[in-house]
Amino acid sequence: MRYWLMKSEPAEFSIDDLAAAPGQTTAWFGVRNYQARNFMRDDMRLGDGVLFYHSSCPEPGVAGIAEVSRLAYPDDTQFDRDSPYFDPKSTRDAPRWLHVDVRLVRKTRLIGLAELRGHRELADMVILRRGNRLSITPITPAQWKLILRLAERKA
């Protein structure tokens, strides 16, 4: 089993939106970075753990736990001319962009950046590095376990 941190802007799709989605499941659409796409295509497996992370908002942080519930398949937004994720170079025969489905396991209290940075065991997390812009990053089993423990604490 592998573990991932997946960022979403809550104004576009929040943990509450995932909780309200049919089956509490959604496609992780709109990824337009090759490394993040490759993580989904090559490395994600069914049941992998996901930290659902709110980004580009007043208080970024881990907002919930999810799991990979469907393996990589073509992201239809790349073919939709009206979508901000449209890619004119992508074709149905040779799609460039893929996504996975994620299913909510549970919402958590928000574990903000300051709290994450306060634990030296998390210092190597990609999300805590300066200049990190990837929307999907791997995390270690030890980081996963610590963040699950933090999620159980009161704020």
Image (tube, grey):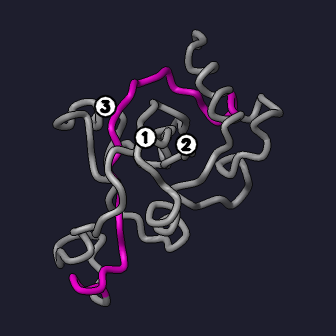
Q: State how far apart marks 3 and 1 are (Cα).
A: 21 Å
Determine the secondary structure under disc 1: loop
Question: Are discs 1 and 2 less than 8 Å apart at CB?
Answer: yes
Q: Which corner quadrant holds the C terminus? A: top right
Most distant residue in the right direction: 120
Q: Pick whichever, 45 or 128, lies toward us.
A: 45
Horizontal relation, residue 121 to residue 58: left or right: right
The residue that mark 2 highlights is 1
The residue that mark 3 highlights is 16
Measured from the top left, where is residue 146 in percent x and y?
Answer: 68, 26
Considering only vertical position in the picture, is 62 above or below 2? above
What residue is shown at x 77% (from left), y 29% (from top)? 118
Assess disc 3: are there few (<14), some (14-19) or many (≥20) residues with their C-alpha within 10 Å of its C-alpha.
some
> Tag 2: residue type?
Met
The quadrant in which residue 17 appears is top left
The residue that mark 1 highlights is 47
Measured from the top left, where is residue 30 in percent x and y?
Answer: 34, 63
Mark closest to the chain's N terminus, 3 or 1: 3
> Tag 1: residue type?
Gly
Assess disc 2: are there few (<14), some (14-19) or many (≥20) residues with their C-alpha within 10 Å of its C-alpha.
few
Q: State how far apart marks 1 and 2 are (Cα).
A: 7 Å
Residues in magenta, as a range: 90-116
Question: Are discs 3 and 1 less than 8 Å apart at CB?
Answer: no
